[in-house]
Image (tube, rainbow, N blue to C red):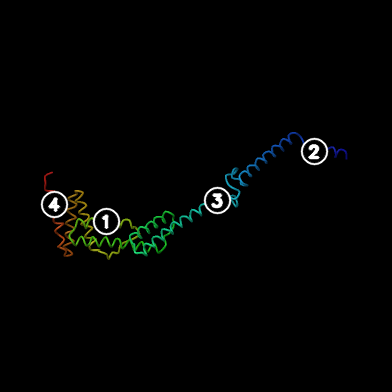
Amino acid sequence: MEFIFNNKMKKKADLLSPTVLVIIAIAVVVGGFVVWIFLSQGGKLSGIFGQTSDDLVGGTNWTKIKIETEERDKQIDELQKLLDEANDLYNKKKYTEALSKYEDYEKKSMEYGVELVKLAKDRLNELRGNKLHAILDEVFRLYNAKSYDQAMTKYGEYLDESKKYTTFTISEGIYTKERNLWGVLYSANNLFNEKKYNEALSKYNAYLAILNENSMQEHKAYAESKIKEINSILSQPT
C-alpha cells in the first residue's frame, strides 16, 4: 500500500517538473495571443487565415459571392435603364436616337454576357432595316437624277452600315437589280480613283453590259465618259 502511494506521488511530482511547467506556460501565452488577435479582428479569423470565420462556413467564400451578386445586380440595372430609355425614344418616334440607344444596350449586353430580350432584337432589326432602306432610297434618287458621284458616295455609306449589322440581312427584294448595278459602278469608280485603270476599264464595260441588258441606256453616258478618260490616260506615253 505504501508502495502504491509513493508511486502516485512520484507521478504527480513528474507532472510538476520544470519542463512540463514551461510547456504549460508557453501554451497559455500562445493561447492568449490567439484570443487577443481574434478579439482585435472583431471576432473574426481574417488576421490569421486570410478569411473571416463567416467565410469558412461549408468551405464557401460567401463574401466573394455577395460581391459578385451585387455587381451582377448593378449590371442588370444598367441594362434595364438603357432598354427603358430606348423604348421611350422608340415610343416617341425618335427612331434615330432609339436605334443608337438599342445599340448601346446590345453592346453592354454582349459585354456582360446577357442575352438580348426579344423586344430589343425585333426593334434593332426593324430600325436597322429602315435605316438601310432609307440610304438605298437616297442612292436611288441620286442615281436617277444622274448625280452618279454622289450616288456612289451614298452607296459606299450603305455598304459601311451593312458591315456593322452582322446579325441583319436586308431583304433581297429591296433594289436587288439596282444594287447589283451600283455595286459594279462603285467598284469601277474605286479602281479608277486608285489609278488601276485597266481593272477599272473592265468594270465600266461590265457596268455598260448590265445597262444594255436592262434597257437602261439613259445611264450610259457617265460610264462612257469614264472609259474615254481611261483610254486617253492609257494612250499617253509612259
Mark 1 sits on what residue? 157
Q: Residues within 10 Å of mark 1 (few under 14, many from 20)?
A: some
Mark 4 sits on what residue? 229
Query: At numbered mark 4, what does the secondary structure look like: helix, strand or loop?
Result: helix
Q: Residue furthest right?
A: 1
Q: Reading the chain from its start, which is encountered first: label 2 or label 3? A: 2
| Position in image of residue 209 (x %, y %) | 17, 60
| Position in image of residue 34 (x %, y %) | 65, 42
Three-letter code, disc 1: Glu
Please state if 205 lies on the left or on the right of 25 as rendered: left
- Residue 52 sits above or below residue 135 on the image: above
Q: Residues within 10 Å of mark 3 (few under 14, many from 20)?
A: some
Mark 3 sits on what residue? 63
Please state if 9 lies on the left or on the right of 94 as rendered: right
Three-letter code, disc 2: Lys
Indicate the quadrant where residue 180 lies: bottom left
Q: Reading the chain from its start, which is encountered first: label 4 or label 2? A: 2
Q: Residues within 10 Å of mark 2 (few under 14, many from 20)?
A: few
Callout 2–callout 3 Cβ contact below 8 Å:
no
Query: At numbered mark 3, what does the secondary structure look like: helix, strand or loop?
Result: helix
Please state if 154 lies on the left or on the right of 235 as rendered: right
| Position in image of residue 119 (x %, y %) | 40, 64
Indicate the quadrant where residue 149 lies: bottom left
The disc placed on residue 12 is: 2
Query: Cα distance, mark 4 to mark 2?
Result: 120 Å
Three-letter code, disc 4: Glu
